[in-house]
Image (spheres, grey):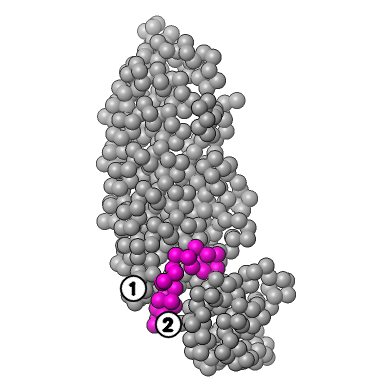
Amino acid sequence: MHHHHHHVPMYQPMYASVPLDKDNTTAVSVPSTPEARPVDSLGSARMSISDGVGSNSSLPSMSASQQDVNHTSVTRDCAQPSAETTADATSVAITHGKSSNTSAQSVARASGVIAHRGSILRAGCDAQSCRTIQSAITHQATRNVHYHWIFEEALASLQTLCMDPFGSNLLQTLVEHASIEQRCSIWAGLAPTFVSVCQSLYGTRVAQKLTDVIGTHAEWASFHAAANGRISELVRDEHAAHVVLKAMRKPDVSIYATFIFNEMATYCEDIAMHRQGCLLLQRGLELAPPASRATLLSRVTELAGILMFDPFGNYVVQYVLDLRLPGVSHDIGLVCTHEIDRAACDKFASNVIEKCIRQASAVLRAAIVAKLAQPEVMQAVMQDSYANYVLQTALDESTAEQHATLISVASKYAHHLSNSPYGKRLHARITNSHQHSTKGNHGNHHHHHSHRAGSHHSGHGYHQRSRHQRQDGHA
């Protein structure tokens, strides 16, 4: 059964999305495998990392138990809290607006924190004790008295606390009330194992909170010391990627952290060909300052001939084409033209070729048509389950003269198509056009919207279609 195929814009993934930020400004989704079907189980915020970011970005989808990874609310219990503990946890946050009597009780409870002096590591990993300590930090009266020793003890046990669901919440509360110097001390404590901290479900929350509150040169220097040389590892992990994304979204990233984009350019191939990395690379292209963006664009263009054949890399090339930068698009178009006989027959590269044909300048489109009209290329293209769509797109987008040229060459091989499951429409189109042209009507060809075999869906939030599987086993 034929369906109209719609090219889904890259920023509207049809995948399950997870919020990247507390305020839900961004969401991301990624298929578990290149073949995964879109699932809307978590709802799809309009986003732009298809593993993506809700407003305009994309990161990997996470299991239900992981969904909270980006919510850094400090008063919530994160390890399967009971109804009772959840209610109790929220009380900390509500006390400020209540009567003085309730507030006094809360402060009295918070004062009980002194019982945990000398054992913050044990207390911080216990639900009840952790809430008492957080109360002491969030109330100014008790904070003035107890913050310093709580901070010093927590700093001594930083690695253990940040890997614990309650310890992680405690550290996030400490970060919110810390001085710049204290925040830099936490950065320094995390630096030796920064990658593994960011890759962990609870550690990433602490790193994200620290990144959220960066506002000074000293904190950026601490971030640089922890993350420098590790960006490629971080962006290829579903939890750690959020830390880098938060840094890239900071307004002063262009002053203090262009090293993020430089490392993305250096390791562009590895990142672009990774399920998670391809999404972060697109966000990098979106958020980079002009000089860094130019470097990234030139790297993607250099690598286009490799990336277009990759299940994830092809999305990066399509993203760059969608930016419609004439020089860059032309350079990628030349690569596509050169590779068209091989690329048109590839499941992933054929998507790039079609986008190229649709966006090509008149000069480039003429070059592509000339290549397709070569008899050996035409013969291969017509008999391939992916490439015949490329040919239909070329027919859709060509001038009357180009259309006539393509039909004239294609008609010589049309007899091969009459029995093929994916070529019937193309066969009908060629024979009808050929009959018209022999009657002198070539120039009045009609543009058709190519019908695609199978259903259409968007992968990673970008355009990807499902086609008949090929005989040679390529999905």
User: Residue 221: which numbered mark, if any?
Assistant: 1
The magenta segment is 180-204
Type of amino acid at the residue the image marks with label 2: Gln
The quadrant of the image that shows the N terminus is top right
Residue displayed at 47% across by 52% down: 276
Query: Looking at the picture, does residue 27 appear above or below residue 129?
Result: above
333 within the magenta span: no
Residue 322 occupies quadrant: top left
Indicate whether 10 appears above or below 115: above
SS assignment at label 2 = helix
User: In the image shown, does 347 or 105 lie closer to the viewer?
Assistant: 347
Mark nearer the N terminus (2 vs 1): 2
Left/right of residue 300 with respect to residue 347 in the rendered view: left
Task: Determine whether label 2 and label 1 are within 8 Å by CB.
Answer: no
Q: Helix or strand or loop: what does disc 1 sit on?
A: helix
Residue flagged by tag 1: what amino acid is it? Answer: Ala
Q: Is residue 462 above or below residue 405?
A: below
Q: Crowding at label 1, few (<14), some or many (≥20) Cα neighbours within 10 Å?
A: some
User: Which residue is identified by label 2?
Assistant: 182
